[in-house]
Image: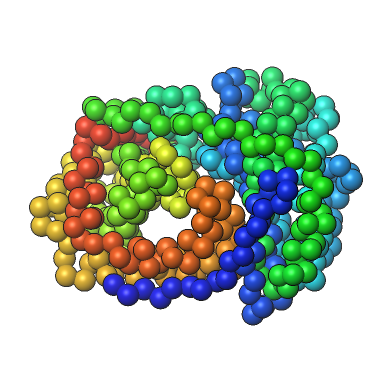
Amino acid sequence: MKIPATKYPVERFTLDNGLRVVLTPDRSAPVVGVAVVYDVGIRSEPEGRTGFAHLFEHLMFQGSENLEKLAHFRHVQGAGGTFNGSTHLDYTDYFEVLPAGALERALFLEADRMRGPRLTEENLQNQIDVVKEEIRVNVMNRPYGGFPWLKLPPVLFASFANSHDGYGSFGDLDSATVDDARTFFERYYASGNATLAVAGDFDVAKATEMIHRHFGDVPSRPAPQLPDFDEPDLTAEKRDSYTDRLAPLPGVASAWRVPDPIHDFERYLPFVVLAEVLTDGDASRLVDRLAQRDRSVTSIGGYIGFMGDEFQVRNPTALLLQANLPPGGDSEKVLRTVDEEIDRLVADGLAAGELERTQARIATHLLRDTDAVLGRALPMAVLELQRGRPEMLNELPKLLGEVTEAQIVEAAATLRPQRRATVEVIPGVSS
């Protein structure tokens, strides 16, 4: 299927201290997006320090070499901008969106905290309390909190890196020290372990000069060696269940390992399309069968990656299916039906127009997401970090449009019950 391609320009260079830079100018609107991505995430946390990558993300907003606490907030918001950060399995990002004239402000702010955040006992204890409250709000006191992104990895994976709780235990958080934070910063927050991306309305020559001026004297530290987090695939189905005291209805989620998204990209790509064939839209196979005809689920979704980041994740990762069930719903019946529909896809192939419709929907989502400056800066920074190819963002719609029916059938044939990990939510609220 012919898919329209984006042609966002990409310029790359590396500073003497190892910081990689990606510039993608677009003068169509007077806005810039700035993203700094560090090659460290949840999987890199040491045992006994669960939740530390996310805790450290919070610490990066508590003042820096030249700025007191809250100054970062005031400088961005005072210029009419927005900012945030987020922690993922394989990276942590920090970003601003500002009027074009405030680009240098964002570059100064990011360079300043790259030199060093204010790691004090007061800041650490304050942010431990903030993170614990975030866990209470998002996981402990929310129906289906942590389902399935926290509940399914320990069923699918065996290693600590892949299976532990990325939000962290209260015990691990409370025992974190300022020395732990300093060690984490020195090891992972090196300029050689980061990528800076700027997208939007700017002059390349001026932006390049500003980047050299602000980031060029950040002390050089080498990037740590990237661990290999791979582990053996399942050879027998694994199941788990838990009672959610706040959940009014049952739920079920399953995951299957998929090929390496970076080093086996050609085999990985069909799984991205397959997830959409199975669950994207009312005409998709599992929505049509389970939600509309059988009424055995109230909703079902499929995606790649526990945090829904199919092109910004390293190996190992998985294809997930997640369903909410009606009162008295039967998870076993749902899983049997999923197996039936996958078997039917493998045996009969795709219906006329099914692949083209799915690819068009995927392309639409990708093109819409990259329309915003941050929708270019963030993924390009990660693509540079993980693949050294930020221009791949332009190529993704076309690459997905080239996936064939045979490749999707071959991918579906690997989704066997013996390779599946499943977790069930048992409702704790009486219906």
Q: Give the residue at the far front of this rendering.
A: 16
Classify residue 129 by image quadrant.
Answer: top right
Pick out the residue farthest to the bottom.
28
Count of picture labels: 0
> How is the structure coloured here?
rainbow
Q: Is residue 56 above or below residue 361?
A: above
Give me the residue at 70% from left, 43% from top.
Answer: 191
Residue 429's spot in the image, x, y percent? 42, 36
Locate the C terminus and report the quarter of the image it occupies.
Answer: top left
Nearer-the-camera pick, 122 or 257: 257
Give the vertical position of 295 relative to 371 (above or below): above
Which residue is depicted at the point 83% across and 42% down? 64
Specify whether residue 58 is in view.
Answer: no
Answer with the quarter of the image where residue 273 lies: bottom left
**Picture coordinates of residue 377, whole percent (x, y):** 61, 61
Residue at image position (43%, 73%) is 5
Observer-nearest residue: 85 or 145? 85
Query: Up-down: is 230 above or below 69?
Result: above
In the rendered view, does 381 fall on the left or right side of 160? right
Q: Judge left or right: residue 7 versus residue 268.
A: right
Residue sticking out furthest to the left: 347
Q: Is residue 121 visible?
A: yes
- The N terminus is located in which quarter? bottom left
Residue ID at (88%, 46%): 67
- Residue 9 at x, y percent in the picture: 57, 71
Drawn side of residue 141 relative to residue 326, left or right: right
Q: Nearer the viewer, residue 399 or 32?
A: 399
Residue 213 x %, y %: 82, 57
Which quadrant of the structure image shows residue 395?
Answer: bottom left
